[in-house]
Image (cartoon, coloured by chain):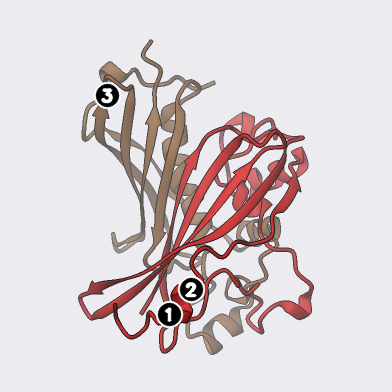
């Protein structure tokens, strides 16, 4: 374990966000489909959501005063790491069910893991946040893992 | 309607249909509005260049992730099923750059009916800005 990964930081693993519940509307799917220049009619008509629509559906809606000066909604699920800055990030999404208008979806996020890896220019810290999305019947819709790399 | 490839015809190395991307400020605005994302590097040119030192307005990372995913979804057709997708944003892309979304088959599991595809967004210098991959299930018909 390197010096970045102190017990206070590691103790945050397992932290869960409050559940966020959102209604899927045809209008929101259509806006998303047009902005991303989808070409399949089912997306443009809003009959089904494109695979990354949940990024928009669960984006935080905060008062302007709570945004950082650069306009960003600060993501409190990712803890700051002393002397390190975010470098890159990635997403992995596993799909279980399509998303359609009228669906009521609930997302819960968990700080799943914090670990170090040896990079070519020193150690890198990897922080993983898991988002589980379920429908109103509690059935899984998708699972997304976001990784933030800090150096 | 779009036809799905048949698993028995799919070979490792097969190219997916690529797409040239000319992302403009209007669609970048619409995208961030659809998200409710106010990050100024996407719409405030003086801020992006003078405060954050960018070469121009930054194309949103998840928007590139979406274009990457579209290459896979358009290839798999109506009966294909997207099981998973992953990508990472490695290099910034700016408004005005002409990008390419590309993909190719990297593995085929005929027993399971599953195909892995490698995906990427390339900039005009041929550099990968956004590498990714997807796992697709094709019907065995």
Give me the C-alpha separation between circle 3 and circle 1.
Answer: 50 Å
The crowd level at tag 2 (other Cα within 10 Å; few <14, some 14-19, many 20+) is few
| Quadrant into which the C terminus of chain A falls | bottom left
Q: From the viewer's perspective, is the residue at label 3 or at label 2 nearer?
A: 2
Q: Residue A13 in the image: x percent, y percent?
A: 48, 67
What residue did someone put label 1 on?
A7
Colour seen for chain B: brown
Q: Is residue A56 above or below residue B91?
A: above
Rendered shade, chain A: red
Q: Name the subunit of mark 2.
A: A
Residue A97, relative to residue A71: is it above or below?
above
Q: Nearer the viewer, residue B73 or A15?
A: A15
Answer left or right for B85 relative to A33: left
User: Contact, CB < 8 Å: mark 2 with mark 1?
Assistant: yes
Disc 1 is placed on an element classified as: helix
- The numbered dot on residue B10 is 3
Residue A51 visible? The answer is no
The residue furthest top is B141
Element type at marker 2?
Answer: loop
Task: Name the residue rendered at 66%, 54% in the picture.
Answer: A58
Q: Residue at x 42, y 37 (%)?
A: B72
Quadrant of the rendered structure where residue B138 is?
top left
The residue at the point 45 percent across, 19 percent down is: B3
Q: Chain of mark 1?
A: A
Q: Which label sits in the foreground, 3 or 1?
A: 1
* Residue A65, position as x, y percentages in the image: 77, 80
């Amino acid at each position: 374990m390197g010096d970045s990964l102190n017990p206070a930081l590691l103790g945050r693993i397992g932290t869960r966000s409050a559940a966020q519940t959102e209604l899927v509307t045809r209008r929101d799917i259509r806006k998303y489909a047009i902005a991303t220049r989808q070409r399949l009619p089912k997306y443009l008509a809003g009959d089904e959501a494109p695979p990354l629509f949940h990024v928009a559906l669960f984006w935080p809606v905060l008062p302007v005063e709570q945004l950082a000066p650069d306009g960003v909604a600060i993501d409190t699920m990712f803890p700051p790491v002393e002397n390190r800055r975010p470098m890159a990030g990635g997403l992995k999404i596993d799909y279980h069910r399509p998303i359609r208008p009228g669906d009521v979806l609930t997302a819960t996020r968990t700080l799943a893991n914090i670990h170090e890896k040896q990079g070519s220019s020193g150690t890198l810290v990897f922080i993983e946040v898991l988002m589980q999305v379920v429908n109103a019947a509690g059935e899984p819709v998708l699972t997304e893992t976001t990784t933030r790399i800090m150096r | 309607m779009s036809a799905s490839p048949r698993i028995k015809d799919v070979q490792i190395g097969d190219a997916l249909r690529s797409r040239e991307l000319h992302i403009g400020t209007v669609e970048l605005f619409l995208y961030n509005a659809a998200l409710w994302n106010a990050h100024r590097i996407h719409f405030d040119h003086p801020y992006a260049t003078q405060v954050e030192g960018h070469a121009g307005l930054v194309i949103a990372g998840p928007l590139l992730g979406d274009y990457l995913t579209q290459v896979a979804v358009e290839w798999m057709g109506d009966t294909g099923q997207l099981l998973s997708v992953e990508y990472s944003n490695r290099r910034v892309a700016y408004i005005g750059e002409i990008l390419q979304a590309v993909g190719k088959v990297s593995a085929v599991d005929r027993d399971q009916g599953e195909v892995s595809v490698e995906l990427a967004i390339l900039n005009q210098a041929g550099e990968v800005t956004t590498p990714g991959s997807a796992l697709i299930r094709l019907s065995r018909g």
